[in-house]
Amino acid sequence: MQVFKKKKLLSDWISLQKSQGKHIGFVPTMGALHSGHLSLVEASKKNNAITIVSIFVNPTQFNNQNDLKNYPKTLTADLDLLKNIDCDAVFIPSVEEMYTAHVISKKYDFEGIENEMEGSFRTGHFDGVATIVQALLETVKPDNAYFGEKDFQQLQIVKKLTKKQNITTNIIGCPIFREKDGLAMSSRNVRLTEKERKEAPFIYQTIKKATTMATTKSILEIKQFVTNTFKSNHLLSLEYFSIADEATLQEATTFEKNKKYRAFIAVNVGAVRLIDNLKILN
């Protein structure tokens, strides 16, 4: 497995692979890898001759500096995991390598989807995400890039980014990977205390119940159910619950035929903020 820290060396190696007619798959991560990340790598390996993973904790997408400071960093373990599943190359740049001058985000217009849900609670978050994803895609120039659907809003942002910036990479969303108790896998889960970890599946249980109500209840009734359910749990604090159109991510007030909807949720579990989402079959 090749390990690169410099964009130039990585680009030269990729050019060599492409000169041999090899397709490139890419999985951008912030490290602290788990089985969900590895499922993205496996998806890439099935459809590309070469799979590259990046590990970079991007400072400009954190609006909470404590979250950035406390974000888990497990580079040695990450590299071992990737080596064990025969990843071809890993890119682990420094902040200086990715932000050559000033560590600031570019400004983007994603036609409003950047202002919904996560965007309304995390100012500037998606500018930071788009800035680093654009830089990584322009460096790696992959044929295909793989993103998990747990960050569904981010996935939609990245798809719009490639269109607006004329980036030819095919963006592929992959299903959420869950623990046996339903909790969506997240690098942040390791920060949960034993008590918090035991209680965290309450998020999935509640959102799953909410999605099953869609055939008989109104959106207002479903939202009230979720709000009241979390009021009964003193360890978990609901930040938002939203049922939104998958295409526009705008919050829905009624279900319409021929539209696809998802339920989105953000919850604070002690000092750890977790998100999840589920498709609604209405």
Image (cartoon, rainbow, N blue to C red):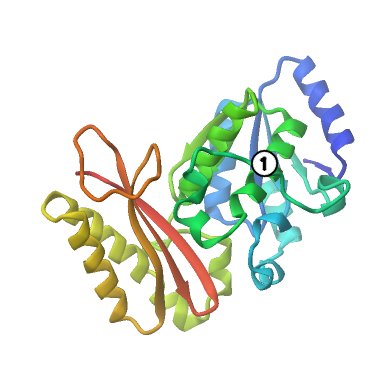
**Direction from residue 36 to residue 138 in the image, left or right:** right
Front in this rendered view, residue 6 or 247: 247
Pick the residue in front: 109 or 118. Answer: 109
Q: Is residue 85 visible?
A: no
Residue 241 versus residue 132 in the image, above or below: below
Q: Mark 1 points at which residue?
A: 133
Tell me where residue 86 appears, x and y as whole percent.
68, 40
Residue appearing at x 18%, y 52% in the figure: 214
The residue depicted at 72 percent of the width and 15 percent of the height is 21
Image quarter for residue 25?
Answer: top right
Q: Is residue 238 visible?
A: yes
Left/right of residue 31 with respect to residue 240 in the rendered view: right
How many other residues sit within 10 Å of disc 1, few (<14), some (14-19) or many (≥20)?
some
Query: Is 148 or 152 nearer to us in this picture?
Result: 152
In the rendered view, does 249 fall on the left or right side of 157?
A: left
201 relative to 40, above or below: below
Q: Is residue 65 above or below residue 120?
A: below
Q: Residue at x 21, y 47 (%)?
A: 254
Q: From the image, which quarter does the N terminus lie in? A: top right
Task: Find residue 175 and report its horizontal and vertical position in percent.
Answer: 43, 44
- Quadrant occupied by the C terminus: top left
What x and y, as percent, mark residue 168?
A: 63, 22
Q: Which residue is drawn at 48% across and 47% down?
A: 153
Numbered-mark total: 1
Q: Which secondary structure lies at badge 1?
A: helix
Instruction: Indicate whether 184 appears above or below 256.
Output: below
* 12 displayed left or right of 135: right
- Residue 118: image x %, image y %? 49, 56
> Which amino acid, mark 1?
Val
